Image (cartoon, rainbow, N blue to C red):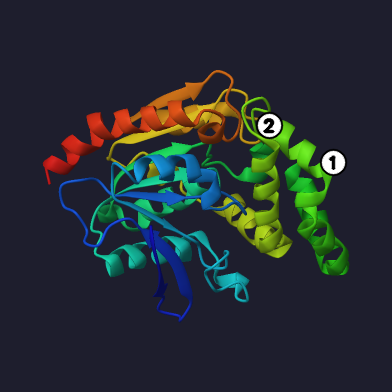
Amino acid sequence: MKANFFKTEDNEQLFYAVNFDQVPSDKPILVFNYGLVCSTYHWSFQTDYFKEKYPILIYDYRGHFQSTGKDNLEKITFKQMAKDLNDLCAHIGIKKAVMLGHSMGVNICLQAAKDFPDLVLGQVLVSGTIMPVTDVMFDTNLMEFIAPFAELALKKYPGVLDKIWKSSGSNPLIKAMIHRQGFKVENVSKEFIEIYLNKVGVLGPELFFQLFNEMTKQNILGDVGKMNHPALVMGGMKDKVIPNHLQHLLHDMMPKSESYFYKDGSHVPQVDYPELTNDRIDLFIQQKIIPELSNL
């Protein structure tokens, strides 16, 4: 993968990496979008596999990891992130792409499809929701009440929460809780969880709450039914974070979508079952995306 940076209109730097020198016209380009305070690491099994088959683009959102913008939280909105993605693709020369999103990455994909429909050739949407996240996370509306208190605690005791947040990767209780709640324990190593939490610690709680609020207020329900491109909606039937019925709802609303659900899959089925996920996405690309590309 060849790493580079792209400067946005407001002078932020977006990190990105591609596996090609020139944009090919005969193969679909895959663009990977990760979840809430996650990283490209959540897609590592897919990017390692697909980089040998298709041109791919991986990148960091503004305010994340190697990209700048963390000091301007108010600009880290889904609308701005979708624009960043569109501008980045234009900079590289990508005119059409398959958007792959996991969890909050689904929101980014859908926002890009709404605001820049000509860019989106198709979508792979994993473990996402188009409903306000405070109403559905963990299959309750508890987050509607917990989130404001947590934000207040962050403002009142920033040092304390920040210390806990940054040390989560070395906290055995937090690691065990995340492992049990977010992943299929027997399929995902403790090392994967530790690396994930260490990356979470880099981002900080302020960014989490900024994007959590974006997930809460995004209003895209009325636009999903107008997205007339192929889509593959995927989810784990044992997802404890975003209930599985919400992926069914998304599938039902998208006119050209198909679905695939993992009987024992968690919120991160692409990590629980990487080979199965890769095969299913590849089948979707072969059957739905490549014929669509040939008609352009």
Residue 18 visible: yes
From the viewer's perspective, tell me whether residue 166 is left or right of residue 280. right
Mark 2 or mark 1: name the one nearer the start of the chain: 2
The secondary structure type at the circle numbered 1 is helix
Label annotation for residue 41: none
Q: Which residue is drawn at the image coordinates 47% and 75% (left, top)? A: 13
Name the spot of residue 126 as percent of width and height, x first: 48, 37
Q: Which residue is drawn at the image coordinates 48% and 40% (left, top)? A: 45
Mark closer to the observer (2, 1): 1
Closest to the observer, 51 or 76: 51
Mark 1 lies on residue: 173
Closest to the observer, 187 or 268: 187
Q: Which residue is drawn at the image coordinates 68% and 31% (left, top)? A: 139
Name the spot of residue 83 as percent of width and height, x first: 40, 65
Q: How many marks?
A: 2
How far is disc 2 from disc 1 in space, using C-alphas? 23 Å
Image height check: is 248 above or below 263?
below
The secondary structure type at the circle numbered 2 is helix
Q: Which quarter of the picture shows residue 276?
A: top left
Amino acid type, callout 2: Asp
Closest to the observer, 272 or 284: 272
Image height check: is 239 above or below 199?
above
Mark 2 lies on residue: 139
Q: Which quarter of the picture shows residue 245?
A: top right
From the viewer's perspective, tell me whether residue 4 is left or right of residue 52. right
Name the spot of residue 295 as percent of width and height, x first: 11, 41
